[in-house]
Amino acid sequence: MLMYLDLHLQLIRMNFFSFEDQGRASDDEMADKLDMVLSQFLKYMKENTSDINVEQWCKVLLLGFDAHILKAHMPPNVPFILFYFFNIHSKLKTVLLDYFWSVFADKNQPAIIRQSGIMYLASFTNRSKSVGKADFKKIMLTTANWCHSYISNNDEISVKCNHTAFYAACQSLFYIFCYRHKEIFSSSEYKMFLDKIDLHLIVHCKLNPLKHCNQHILRMFNKLTSMYEIVACSAVIERNSRMLLPSTQLLGNEEYPFKHCLLTLTSSFIQPYFKDMECSNEFQSEFRQYKVSENFEDWDNIIGEASIAMSPDFQAMSL
């Protein structure tokens, strides 16, 4: 029921359905119904999990997510069940992070599922207050090492090859960097960490990941790496703007999950564990563009902008 309401509401916001039939519930009524059911479930989950049964809850939720949510088209609200559970039981968060990574790293999974895995991993890393500095640095290093290995084995563009998983991993690495850059540079060992993830190698490899990156993340990444003087991206971006790549090499228009819970009652459960973006005033405008509006009336503009920023051809691809 939750998945049906969430996905149906999402389609309504995207104007996939009209409301000419008087018997059809309005979008506000559907949102209220989803909010009530979801918030009651979160309340029940909090009141009925304990040290005795928490691992069983964990197993059931991951099985349900794998079977119903992961393969769906990024439902905006229902995934917050997982977000909430692994924040109120933060000692188990590594189980969730390892699960997301295993989905991405599984070569037998379709490309769109692998992309979803790394996007859920990156978004939970950025948005959950339970993910500390040691956690996100480990995730960044693991992702960077995977990218380095991929580059060593595939550092050529080939019409016969599909590099979607690589581009999704690079974009997610840039995404985490943009959100957690202050914490990275607050450490006295930041130079050693940056040497390990070697963003220069990734940015300047022949696979050209910047060409396939979401435009808002790309602009923010470019601004930050320029400010910190760690990677020269501008020349690559300028060159990419003058060249055309086959459409089959482009990512899709998926947005990262866990951006914001737009349901009032449910949000009251989520907000204490939700990490907002922290950046200086000069960067606020860029992330304001990438932030999901809390006004449903702006939804069409957001969808349209995302569609322009990224090609929809990804969903037809597999690795």
Image: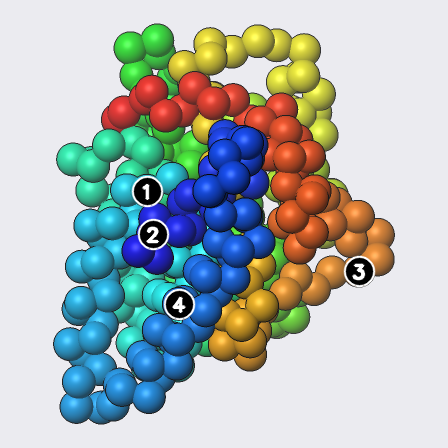
Residue type pointed to by label 2: Met
Earlier in the chain: of badge 4 and badge 2, it is 2
Q: If you read the primary sequence from the N terminus, does the residue marked by circle 4 or circle 1 appear first?
A: 4
Residue to which mark 1 is pinned = 72
Of the numbered discs 3 and 2, the one sitting upstream in the chain is: 2
**Residue 116 shows up from this direction:** yes
User: 10 Å neighbourhood of mark 4: few (<14), some, or many (≥20)?
Assistant: some
- In the rendered structure, which amino acid carries the disc numbered 3? Ser
Residue 98 location in percent, x, y?
27, 61
First in sequence: mark 3 or mark 4?
4
Asked whether disc 3 touches disc 4, contact meaning CB atoms under 8 Å apart, the reply is: no
Image point (50%, 76%), residue name: 269
The reply, left or right, for residue 167 in relation to residue 161 is right
Distance of mark 4 from mark 2, alpha carbons? Answer: 11 Å
Measured from the top left, where is residue 211 in percent x and y? 56, 24
Judging depth in this view, the residue of 315 and 163 nearest the camera is: 315
Vertical comparison of 136 with 286: above or below: below
Above or below: residue 277 compared with residue 295: below
**Closer to the camera, 150 or 107?**
107
- Looking at the rendered image, the disc whose residue lies closer to the viewer, 4 or 1, is 4
Measure how far apart labels 1 and 2 are at the Cα level.
9 Å
Q: At numbered mark 2, what does the secondary structure look like: helix, strand or loop? A: helix
Which one is in front, 142 or 2? Answer: 2
| 281 sits to left or right of 312 | right
**Distance between mark 3 and mark 2 Cα atoms:** 37 Å
The residue wearing badge 4 is 37
